[in-house]
Image (spheres, grey):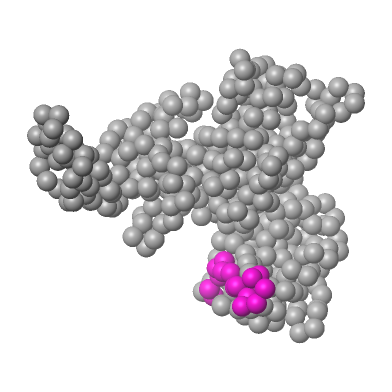
Amino acid sequence: MNELIFEENREAVVRLSERQLSALEEVGRRMAGRADWWGSERNAKQLGAVGDAASVIGIRRRLDGRQSVVFRNVAGSLRIGDLKLQIRPKIPLAHFFYLMSRSDVAPRVDSASIDIDSSHELQELIIAWLVDEAERVIRLGLHRDYSDYAEELAEVRGSIHPIPTALANLSGRAAVFCEYSDLDEDAAINRLIKAACGEAASDARIGSLVRQRARRLVTAMAQVGPLRRSDSRFQPTRLHSRYSRVLPLAKLVLAGKGASITAGDLAGRGFLIPTPGLIESGLRNVIAGALAPRDVRKRGLRLVEGGISLNPDLLIEGGQAVGDIKYRHFGGDWDRASLNQIVTFATGFGAKSGFIVGFGRGPHARMSVQARVGDVAVRKFAWDASSDAHPEQSANLLAEEVRTWLQ
């Protein structure tokens, strides 16, 4: 079996057959069509998942018969016939998995227990986390909500629909057609969890023990119905606090499901997940831990005029400082767009300090660039993503730099 290795957002020149290209194009379109799973319309646009030719996989045919292929802000693996494709994150795997373990989707586990050498194992890790968290929710009890039903019954319940009831009686059936609400486990949040566990249980690439646990979870949710299209728009409330970790994992699994297709007689199956949200969440939690007990959160501000909203990734103590996370490698100097953005964020929230956080390697691994625009002091911090840097050390160095600067 042939194997190709890609890095997300980096174009690679390959030679693929027309059937393989068709399968890849279908994967890209299908995942783009699932933009409702990317977290927001803004994220979908950043991922190339919006538009007439929407696709998370860019393919450009070259004059020499080869193709240029780029995977846009996704990581994971694909298998198309006898071809395996591994899509690695743009930062070293050790750093990616460390930050993912610090993100909101990860269970509270010791990062030392994560030992992954390739992005092929990304799916198995996420599904193992999903199963762990789903089992915890089952132990605590599934959320119950009111569901609406309209059906023929032997006795009156709720409101009666006279015409269907009359037709049933005229045809010889002693029944009433009723519309009613019932408190049960067939709620949107449970359907999402069950559907994700069903995907895990049916995937032969997952270890047999994890699949067996996933099947038991599906059986335990027998009263929960199949996934509905509207479920992707579900927003949890305080009543769903016990689902806070399993729900993002379920959505990741269902998002990755879009990478499984059949193009003609060539089957394609894989698991691709959007990376920017994971990295943003992981870095925010690292910085929040460094600045504790100060309040660090993501919050937007809608301006009264112009319909413009400001959405920094980091708001410290309600506006003492603002920050933004860039999932990219920094160069030496400020780029105009990032500088303008962070100054705008700081001005909008009335903050005197603004900073951006990204990644550095080589000569830029420990880069720290400062500037001042009017009354706003700005700074650029880089997580050391060099291949020989230990993620824990990079996290501690970044935390100390941010904490010291904001004192």
| Residue at point 27%, 52% (across, down) | 146
Mark count: 0
Near-viewer residue (27 or 357): 27
| Residue at point 80%, 22% (across, down) | 15
Q: Name the chief secondary structure element in magenta.
A: loop
Does 383 sit left or right of 33 as displayed? right
| Residue at point 9%, 34% (across, down) | 174
Magenta segment: does it hold 296?
yes
| Residue at point 68%, 56% (across, down) | 394
Q: Position of residue 166 (x, y in %)?
A: 16, 39
Q: Is residue 34 above or below residue 315?
A: above
Q: Residue furthest bottom?
A: 375
Does 139 sit left or right of 296 as displayed? left
Residue 321 visible in the current orientation: no
Magenta segment: does it hold 181?
no
Q: Is residue 285 above or below residue 99?
A: below
Q: Position of residue 357 (x, y in %)?
A: 70, 62
Near-viewer residue (280 or 154): 154
Name the quarter where the C terminus is drawn.
bottom right
Does 107 sit left or right of 383 as displayed? left
Q: Position of residue 296 (x, y in %)?
A: 56, 70
Name the quarter where the N terminus is drawn.
top right
Range of residues picked out in magenta: 294-308
Q: Position of residue 153 (x, y in %)?
A: 15, 39
Q: Residue furthest right?
A: 63
Residue 242 visible in the current orientation: yes
